[in-house]
Amino acid sequence: MTDATLNTAGKAVELPTLEGSIGPSVLDIRKMYAATGQFTYDPGFTSTASCESGLTYIDGDEGVLLHRGYPIGQLAEHSSFMEVCYLLLNGELPSQSELGQFSRIISRHTMLHEQLATFYRGFRRDAHPMAIMCGVVGALSAFYHDSTDINDPQQRKIASHRLIAKMPTIAAMAYKYSVGQPFLYPDNSLSYTGNFLRMTFGVPAEPYVVVPEVERALDRIFILHADHEQNASTSTVRLAGSSGANPFACIAAGIACLWGPAHGGANEAALNMLREIGTPDRIPHYIARAKDKNDPFRLMGFGHRVYKNYDPRATVMQKTVREVFAALKVNDPLFETALQLEEIALSDPYFAEKKLFPNVDFYSGIILSAIGFPTTMFTVLFALARTVGWVAQWNEMISDPNQKIGRPRQLYTGPVQRDYVPLSAR
Ligand code: SDX
């Protein structure tokens, strides 16, 4: 690929082309401002690569998602969430003994500092669990002083393990607090996902039996959410981390960003939307609303900045709905509504022309609801699973020799300089 020459403002600047291992090349504009005195303008970063990364690759036109080169469908089918965590953090799939050792390390960090339990009691019982997550994760740096030095690789590693390990405990406690049941300590004889199910749905008065099909389905949902390139929350974590902030604060920032309904909050919004639609006969009304520019209503769980094809995670998700229904011997009529909504939308020219397809959030709520999670917990589960991606991206950023504090510029459209007018003269 030849470099480009940009002629602008009476000056010419050579813009080198950088090639990745796969995917579109990028124009390196780092010298552009110094050479021309002009910035680029790209709200929403639709044409801007903010960093170099070797973690996750997406081909949005083809509907391809690779983690460290491995297709998401293969990982979802054959691996476990712990394997994917290892892969994202270390770059390669683990051997049997590496996986055993990694799982043991993670399970050794599942407990929370006992004093953190008092934190929860400061929240209202009806607090949204995402509000609790933001607060408690942000507070972790006040409890784990020995893993906040970002310049020490060993401390970074311990912080990463702590975050991955403690997130299920924090999430389950947020749920327990909302339903007024006692917190359960982790049981490290269980798998990562089995332990989370027990801490969420178990009670101290009875033994809890993990249903293997549910454990497998939830583990797969975690795999599907593990990482996704430079999405809004990951970019938030990187931006927060670029100032040298500690990892717990950075992940709390990511959780806050994920909460929005245009991002991770869409799984909650999608199920609420399906409940509002109710029966398939009401679908045309909602399709018409989604197409109406004057109506803020949008099909939640539909559309994606990068995918202009079916989100490969939605394919796995749809299959998992059937498996969970069969294992739990349940059937949710909303699944039929969702299937028909997808079919009607995909055959509508509006959605076809704009290349709007179901995304990861469209079917996940139906599964999570069947397992027993209230809608308010859906985004919490997304945050739990995405923590490994955030942490891996944060580590990658800190190790990047090109890393600088994130500092975008702007197109200023405010008043030009003017003199202060005394209050008495206004
Ligand atoms: C996630 O980025 C990631 O990787 C995120 C994620 C991850 O794993 O991290 O994949 C997780 O966040 C999934 C997305 C969850 N959000 C939703 O499902 C909310 C509904 N979707 C949209 O709001 C929207 O599609 C976004 C936010 C996902 C993408 O927004 P873009 O890329 O800024 O696109 P856009 O909003 O400018 O839409 C382009 C056009 C617009 O119409 P025009 O102005 O061109 O006429 O498509 C229309 C939009 O109005 N459109 C929709 C629509 N989504 C886009 N119309 C109806 N229903 C929709 N859902």
Image: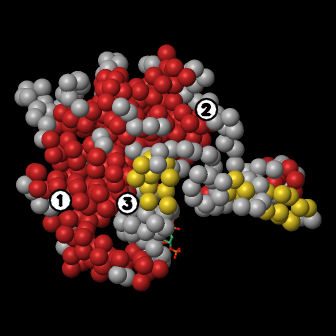
Between the C-alphas of marks 3 and 1, the distance is 17 Å
Tell me where residue 219 appears, x and y as whole percent: 27, 43
Image quadrant occupied by the C terminus: bottom right
Horizontal side of 198 relative to 405 (left or right) equals left
Residue at the (48%, 25%) spot, across then down: 157
* Quadrant of image for the N terminus: bottom right
Q: Earlier in the sequence, mark 3 or mark 2?
A: 3
Q: Say which mark, if any, is on residue 312.
A: 3
> Is disc 2's CB within 8 Å of ligand 1?
no
Q: Is residue 386 above or below residue 262?
A: above
Residue drawn where x is 44% and y is 60% of the image = 64
Identify the residue at horizontal 67%, vertical 57% (top origin): 26
Q: Earlier in the sequence, mark 1 or mark 2?
A: 1
Q: Which residue is mark 2?
A: 399
Name which residue lies at 36% across and 27% down: 98
Badge 3 vs badge 2, beta-carbon distance below 8 Å? no
Q: Quadrant of residue 246?
A: top right
Q: Is residue 330 left or right of residue 417?
A: left
Q: Nearer the viewer, residue 103 or 114?
A: 103
